[in-house]
Image (cartoon, grey):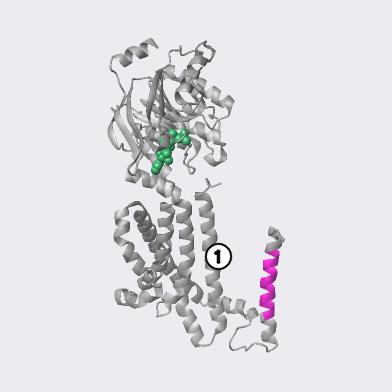
Amino acid sequence: MDTLTAERNADACVLKAHDLALGFGGQRVLEHVDLRLAPREFIAIVGASGVGKSTLLRALCGLLPAVAGERWLDESPRDGARPWSMVFQAPRLFPWRRIRANVALGLEGLGLSREERQRRALAPLELVGLGDMPERFPSTLSGGQQQRVGIARALAVKPRVLFMDEPFSALDAITRRRLQNELIDLRQRTEAAIVFVTHDIEEAVLLADRVMVLGGHQGGAPARVIDTLEITLPTDNRREHADFGAQVHHLETLIGAVPEAS
Amino acid sequence: MKSVSRSRRTGLGALGLVAFVALWEISLRLGLLPGNLVPLPSAIPTVFWGEVVDGIWWEVVSSSLSHYSVGVAIGSLAGIAMGVAAALLPVFDALHAWLARLLRPIPPLAWIPFAIIWFGITPSAAAFIISIGVFWINYFASYSAVRAVDPGYDEVARAFGQGSLLARLTKVSLPAAAPGILGGLRAGLGQGWMTVVAAELFGIPGIGQRMMEASGLLATDIVVVYMLTIAALYALFDLGFLHLQKRLLIWTP
Ligand SMILES: Nc1ncnc2c1ncn2[C@@H]1O[C@H](COP(=O)(O)OP(=O)(O)OP(=O)(O)O)[C@@H](O)[C@H]1O
Ligand SMILES: [Mg+2]
């Protein structure tokens, strides 16, 4: 935790957004988004359905051009890796590729040999618990298994910034718990900074260093950042921590999910 | 309606065919049908064997096959290339949209005068006429197949560094549209046989020309031999293609 804070203060930065505004066809969805993400930092974005979480994620990675404002992502090249990757809200696997080839998609064009790509595709598949079915086609997998392949595909390219759009929401409670723990674990082992969208406030408090709350879009007005909250719990065993419930509750009141505490 | 089992369907199909041929044969033998207008079914195998022994059958079939394969290959390749390009490049699409709408309704056989002027009475003329019908089928099939590809796949490609036009073509558009493109190819294989006979009627050696000769001599049995030949060749090509299609699309559920 201390090292993360130090890094952020030292102005190391992998992703920046300044006064970002997003929309479709003249209609603004989201306005005034400011963001700085330090290496290895984990930020969660929460908000009600339709507030613009997926839209913000697509703009931050560069898939969607912004209506106004600036966005910068550290794209300096590294061997055998990509600057960023994304776990989409729907898995969106290529049905014509086998699982292993789906995971290897981002490894193509990085100058890796065929064997190297095959090998590097297998490791993240094992991580998400699907190491035993690399030769199957996506249509033969359950929805949750497909979502896990989507996670493996994003991890395979060793991104500097990993965008995750509600990656666990389609999973059963047991698998979700396991992958949440894997993700906490993974953070010790990767350099990736993570931008994690979720509508599950507990999940945000469990995983993130910071939580950005989007809202204020009632009545057709563009949404904005209502608040950004530092999570001050230790990374290990947060669920068991005495303040866990309090932080969750505080966030819930911010979003308006529960009435202001009396 | 009660559904019929697979083996029962096969049995009933064979029964219907045999009954039809038997009825035809009996009607002729009883004098219910004029023998100079329709041949006796039982005479067909002998006539077929005669054509084979004379070497005529193989000669006309092989030359028709060469018109057919060249025409289908050119028509399919050009149709798929143009259809895919139109679906991926909006400016190209808009540029030739009116032209395509203008040329599309012209039947392949209406091109015969130009085929003769441009190529003479040559195999190339026949191949050209065959290629036209095949072209349009493949053009529209691949155009709509590529247009129907989920744009979400393109976004995935861009997210994983495969955003160049070439990468999206080979890694998204073509594989995703493959079922539709292959469907067009198969329809084109059938359409090719529809035009092959007509394309040979004006003097280019092949099945069509042989049938015209036979009809001039009122040799209806020879005409039927080649009608059945075309049906058999079509079935053979279609079966082969279905096999290939199944192998290429093993990923479809
Ligand atoms: N391609 C698009 N064209 C027009 N409007 C869009 C488009 N994509 C999203 N929107 C609109 O932008 C708003 C935000 O959508 P977005 O998908 O970002 O919401 P979200 O916060 O991710 O919701 P959820 O939690 O349900 O996934 C919605 O009102 C949606 O209708
Ligand atoms: Mg969303």
The N terminus of chain A is located in which quarter?
top left
Q: On screen, A87 above or below B91?
A: above
Q: Residue furthest front?
A: A262
- Residue A22 picture location, percent across and down: 34, 36
> Tag 1: Cα neighbours inside 10 Å, few (<14), some, or many (≥20)?
few
Percent of width and height locating residue A185: 47, 18
Residue at 59% across, 89% down: B36
Q: Is residue B9 visible?
A: yes
Q: Position of residue B167 (x, y in %)?
A: 35, 43
* Prevailing secondary structure class for the magenta stretch in the rendered image: helix
> Is B252 in front, or is A211?
A211
Instruction: Find numbered disc 1 in the image and state the secondary structure of the residue it sits on.
Output: helix
- Give me the chain letter of mark 1: B
A139 above or below B106? above
In magenta segment, residue B15: yes
Q: Nearer the viewer, residue A218 or A69?
A: A218
- Quickly name the residue at label 1: B235
In the image, taking residue A4 as reference, residue A182 lies left or right, namely right
- Place residue B204 in its image quadrant: bottom left
Indicate left or right for A140 with B201 as reference.
right
Q: Identify the residue at image location x=51%, y=78%.
A: B54
Q: Is residue A242 above or below residue A180?
A: above
Whole-percent x, y for residue A198 in the image? 47, 28
Q: Quadrant of ligand 1?
A: top left
Q: Looking at the image, which residue is at 47% across and 55% down?
A: B180
Residue at image point 48% right, 58% down: B183
* Residue B55 in view in this figure: no
Q: Nearer the viewer, residue A42 or B167?
A: A42
The magenta segment: B10-23
